[in-house]
Image (spheres, grey):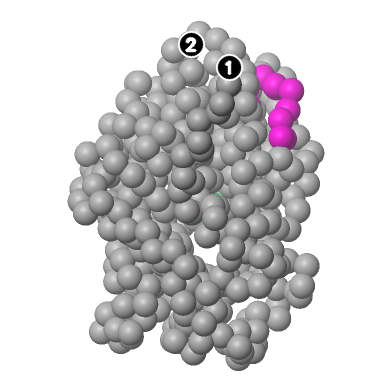
Amino acid sequence: MRIAIAGGGLGGLTLARILHRHGIDAVVYEREASRSARPQGGSLDLHPESGQQALAAAGLAARFQSQARPEGEEHRILDPSGRTLVHHRPQPGSFSGRPEIDRSALRDLLLDSLPGDTVAWRHRLAAATPRPGGGWELTFHDGRRTGCDILVGADGARSVVRPLLTDVELSAVAILVELGIEDVDRRHPELAELVGPGNLWCIGVRQILAAQRLGDGSLRVGISLRAEDRSVDTYRSKRGLLDLFGAWDPRLTALIEAGDGAPAPRLIEAMPTGTHWTGRPGVTLLGDAAHLMPPVGEGANQAMLDAAELAGHLAANPADPDSAIRAYEEAMFTRIHPIAEMSERVQTMMLSPTAAEDIVRFFTPRRAEPASAD
Ligand SMILES: Cc1cc2nc3c(=O)[nH]c(=O)nc-3n(C[C@H](O)[C@H](O)[C@H](O)COP(=O)(O)OP(=O)(O)OC[C@H]3O[C@@H](n4cnc5c(N)ncnc54)[C@H](O)[C@@H]3O)c2cc1C
């Protein structure tokens, strides 16, 4: 059985690793030129019931713990005047929660766990066509071709494999503008202090200014705005962004001023909640290719759990991979539906006029309800 995985992100690599542990070979076709071709972005918190569970199935739990940053769970929420609304501090040294790890460290951990020839770099999948006797003919952007029996689309938000199974369209949910600040302790100690060891969210009306500390001593700044307000191109200059935050405390907008280089805006999209498809032999999807959701902390965790579950089904039923895929898909659709609904709700809440009160309520543990009289 020749398994091809399109996409060497967190989902695709987790799948390859767990299959490898079960003695099943797979090739990961990745469009990037090498592991360091592109910065991998910010830090992620891995949840015990999904991302961490997948890493345990991959035999990488101990390595994860040695690289994760439990202190990165610290979370501060401020209003535009700089007043603290929520300050969540994790238990010192605790691994019971959702420790943060830089995306690049997590991806390296997975890459290092695979045989050297598992990832075929510089292979951007352009098309997959069914072969007459079953399986798929894969064509890459430079004209190279190969075949496989099973194709797994782990190729992210704009998946090339997805249209083989569903014709859903993406819709815009927000604009995210990103900036980086290197070497923050030395160059901007006041910003290091403001953000702390984890995450900071400053919540205004229909706009959020957030920052996150990474393991390499840099800050990643992210500004979330409504997609319908303006086009992405209007957010390419710091001046334009600062105008949007004109009434905010300058201690907060210093995060924009200090950004190294020009702001990088992008459209954040999502698939319709409840997307599912009728199975087709020899092909499936995982991660963002299967269920692109607003980015509120679940996407990578669910991509990794998809990978663990798909690998488990394929390993348990190697003689009938199509049945294994169907079992994976049915369970995945059921698992993802409420998570996608929650992600949509939280995303809407974050950019609503009452975001600050709603988010504080969301983060404040409820008091126990009084016992019912009957
Ligand atoms: C700003 C932001 C913050 C986020 N924060 C969190 C968080 O805190 N926690 C969390 O759980 N999730 C978070 N997410 C979501 C998370 O990033 C994704 O859900 C996750 O990366 C999905 O993993 P994946 O492997 O499915 O796809 P990706 O990580 O997108 O990987 C896809 C891979 O496929 C490759 N590829 C694409 N097209 C092709 C092609 N045609 N041929 C070959 N290769 C291809 C890409 O280069 C990439 O390596 C966030 C998302 C965003 C945008």
Q: Measuring from the top left, give residue 48's x and y in whole percent.
A: 37, 37
Alpha-carbon neighbours of circle 2 within 10 Å: few (<14), some, or many (≥20)? some
Look at the numbered discs 2 and 1 and tell me whether their residues touch, using CB distance below 8 Å: yes
146 in magenta: no
Q: Which residues are magenta?
A: 274-283
- Location of residue 336 by image quarter: top right
Side of 184 relative to 122 (left or right): left
Residue drawn at (41%, 34%), measured in percent from left and top? 49
Per the image, label 1 sits on a secondary structure element best described as helix
Q: Nearer the viewer, residue 211 or 104?
A: 211
Position of residue 339 measured from the top left corner of the image (x, y, whole percent): 59, 39
Left or right, 190 with respect to 204, comes to: left
Identify the residue at horizontal 66%, vertical 72% (top origin): 205
Give the amino acid type for the residue marked by disc 1 in the picture: Ala
Q: Quadrant location of residue 166?
A: top right
Residue position for label 2 = 317
| Residue 93 percent location from the top left of the image | 20, 51
Q: Which residue is mark 1?
A: 327
- Residue 178 appears in view: no
